[in-house]
Image (cartoon, grey):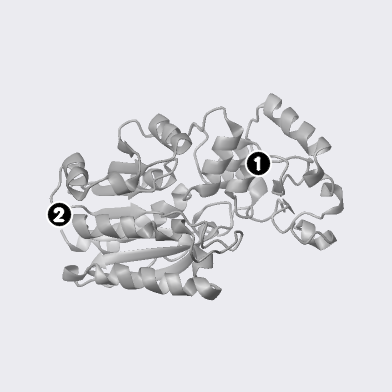
Amino acid sequence: MAEVKPFSVVSTFAGCGGSSLGYKLAGGNVRLAVEWDDGAAAIYRTNHPGTDLFHGDIADLSVEDALARIGLKPGELDIFDGSPPCQGFSIAGRRNIEDQRNQLFREYVRLLRGLRPKAFVMENVGGMVVGKMRILFAEILRELKASGYRVAARKLNAADYGVPQSRVRMIFIGAREDLEIDPTHPAPTHAPVSAAAAVQGLRLDEAEVARLIEIGNTRKAYSMWEFLKPGQNLTKIGLKVGFNGVRVNPMRPCPTVTKSLGQLGMYGLMHWAERRAFTIAELKRFSSFPDEFDFGNDYTNAAERLGNTVPPLLMKAIAAHIRTTILEKTR
């Protein structure tokens, strides 16, 4: 049997490296990652020491510099990846159509047109097709197609791909027009994995648990925990702003892990059996990271990075599908 050649990847808006890990699990070689946030970049470097990291503003990375770093010519890269910041689209946020973060996809498109990869993946929140944000969704789709790609966009739930978390995201997949391949999305690969099953056998840091319990017993956000049934959020008991405050149902996938979990004492996910937030080790399991993936000792930074990440097993499924349906047909 012939040896399978690893496919090449450039990952922009790379965060802590969830996408990169997914690509690697699917047989990819991530040649370059781009991330500006200091906390995310530090975690990325720790866990992906063999990947060239451009730590800075994507606007400062030229096409020529990117090509030199990856050692390829335009058209030779296999997959160009990116998750432009999505806060302006998020249902959980204010959904400001003028939010400048909504325009960062233009930097993604600039590099896409310069690198001309065989395929691309762009991830964003499902809320970008709700209400007035559909205008921006249509604009993004138009720009991607105008870049010379056939494009398919579809919501995927990470829970359908082995991730113990209900996390719905819009996934754009593109195939370069000259390849004459219509891109598709991977079919679900897994039955839902419950939150309880995800953390089974996990050894927790006793000091971290004690600190979280202390916070849970002293801050208002957790004061209604005992009145919630597993799976209920705080709106069930009359708090209009409490839909993010959820006592997690252990028999179902964890609800979406969000960046706000890093702000302890704010409304967020709560353990089903103890009045507390989840440890970083538990959040890693919910996001399909291996236990050895090192998020450091800063709880806030780690939780925020987990809230922004693309779950590795979701990206593994997407990457494996692209490899089979696009890349292997071009070789």
- Percent from the top left, x then y, of residue 89? 51, 63
In depth, the one of 311 and 221 nearer the eye is: 221
> Which residue, given by chain and number where applicable, does mark 2 sit on?
74
- Percent from the top left, x then y, of residue 238? 84, 61
Q: Residue at x 34, y 49 (%)?
A: 12
Residue type at numbered disc 2: Pro
In depth, the one of 117 and 35 nearer the eye is: 35
Q: Residue at x 61, y 45 (%)?
A: 198
Q: Is residue 136 visible?
A: yes
> Which residue, given by chain and number where applicable, does mark 1 sit on?
263
Residue type at numbered disc 1: Gln
Q: Is residue 93 above or below residue 27?
A: below
2 vs 1, front mark: 1
Q: Is residue 247 left or right of residue 258?
A: right
- Percent from the top left, x then y, of residue 114? 20, 56
Residue 300 in which image quadrant = top right
Q: Residue at x 60, y 42 (%)?
A: 283
